[in-house]
Image: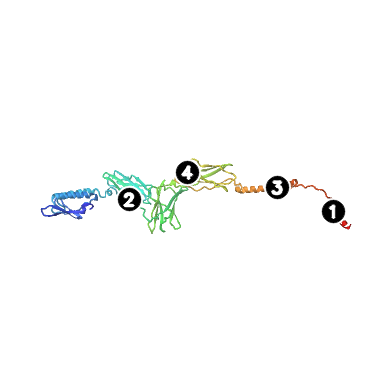
Amino acid sequence: MVGGCRDRRWEPRRESECGPRSWRAGPAPDRIPETSLLGVSGLETPFPPASSDLSGHCQLLLFLASLAGGGPSSPRDSMPGGLCWAVLLWAVGGLTSAQPDAEEEVIQNLTLEPRKIKLTWQSPVNITDATCAISQVGNLFTEDEPEEDTNLYYCVFENHRLCKGANFTVNVTTPQGSFTKQLFFTNKGREGSAAENFTCVVYDSKFLNCSWTVGKKAPKDVQYRLYSQASRTDEERECLQYRANACGIHVGCHYGNLSMFKRNNYFFVNGSSSEAEIRFYDTTSTLLDRIEQYNPPRNIKVNCSKSNCLIQWEKTVTALNPQSHEVTYQLDIQRKGGDTIPQICQDGESQGTFYHFPSYDERAEYSVRIRVGNRRRPGVLWGPWSEPIRLGSGEQAGSPWLVWVLVVFGTLVFALGILCLWKRFLGTQKFFARIPRIKDSLNDFPFQSNQCSIQCRTMTWTL
């Protein structure tokens, strides 16, 4: 027994038959004989257990019993001594009976259904107030009031996940006081064996694809399976059209229609292996309208003048009919052989489904494509691009630097040609005219002059 009641027993010791009594301590027996008021003894009953905080009360009652005279084990116990010991046993039993396992009596059968995150318990007493709470890694704490069904209480934590573990707490208030009980949940299995990088996307307004990667520390023979729930209270359903990697491990699954889903959905990837236990992966509430990837807009039309173009399109078909402010458009306009034009984002609500392209040159060639973004999530989820549409005649010459080179070269050739013509027909006659000279009869007839000179020289020598 805890405390002073079971640690020691008191035995009478007489110095003489008529002398005063004294008490000595001895080892406590497992059972103490109960003395009946009628003098019938020999019935063995367990000594009532006591908590450690009641040891002072027990010692006080034993002290009072000793003053009354007669120990419980003494064969000479008198009627007053037996009466005192009866009162002692009743008092200690009354003090200790209200204390042990009080929470066990008020909060019973506390259990958890992991797939539904449903916490249930029972209580046989009248409860005036009750709360249930879940706390997880990252200081995530949620408290709720339980539902009641014929002494069965339960709480369902919808938007939570258990793959990282959780601590559940139940607090109840009764006329006798307040009581608390906790339940700890851990994701059993090898660390790093659970599926990773889980994502889902709705496309073509009627299909759903989910994909994941194999855990970094998963065994080679691991196999994953995907389950879904339309709500936490619904039964889970397995996906049937799996996609496997080169090793045959499931890394994705395809749903052929969305009729089995609601707006809020939950996914659960379970793993199995003969080598080790595999941890599971679960998601919080997944809203289909936030994971829908919109198709490109329909019927894109372009009307151009010499200086600008009007680009128009129709809204795309979606599965969950988003509002105008939940849709955005992105235009990609590129000029062939020119500078890159930044992509243009347009709000579907304020700017509509058309765009004016101001810097248009009909001699150039352009390509235009459009895609639609889902703004129902923190980051925009963009859909695929539309097929490019061609604009312009494309008759413009090559790049500007080549045009400048050709212009300069042509100018030089033209200038040289003009200079040559000017020099040939005009320049030589105007600036280089022939100067007249005195006529020399001798020089004008060179043959005769030479002959005469020879004759003169001959005649001179003859003289």
Q: Are marks 4 and 3 in contact (CB under 8 Å)?
A: no
Q: Residues within 10 Å of mark 1 (few under 14, many from 20)?
A: some
Q: Which comes sooner in the sequence, label 4 or label 1?
A: 4
123 to 215, vertically: above or below: above
Which residue is located at x 64 percent, y 48 percent? 408
Which residue bears the numbered disc 4? 327
Side of 188 where 383 appears, left or right: right
Residue type at tag 2: Leu
Q: Earlier in the sequence, mark 2 or mark 4?
A: 2
Number of the label disc, if any, that sits on residue 183: 2
Q: CA distance from mark 1 to mark 2?
A: 146 Å
Q: Which mark is residue 419?
A: 3
Precedes in sequence: disc 1 or disc 2: 2
Is tag 3's residue or tag 1's residue first in the polypeptide sequence? 3
Residue 415: give x, y in percent of width and height: 68, 47
Q: Position of residue 25 (x, y in %)?
A: 18, 54
Whether residue 44 is visible: no
Precedes in sequence: disc 2 or disc 3: 2
- Name the residue that disc number 1 marks: 449
- How many marks the image carries: the answer is 4
Q: Say which of marks 4 and 1 sits in front.
A: 1
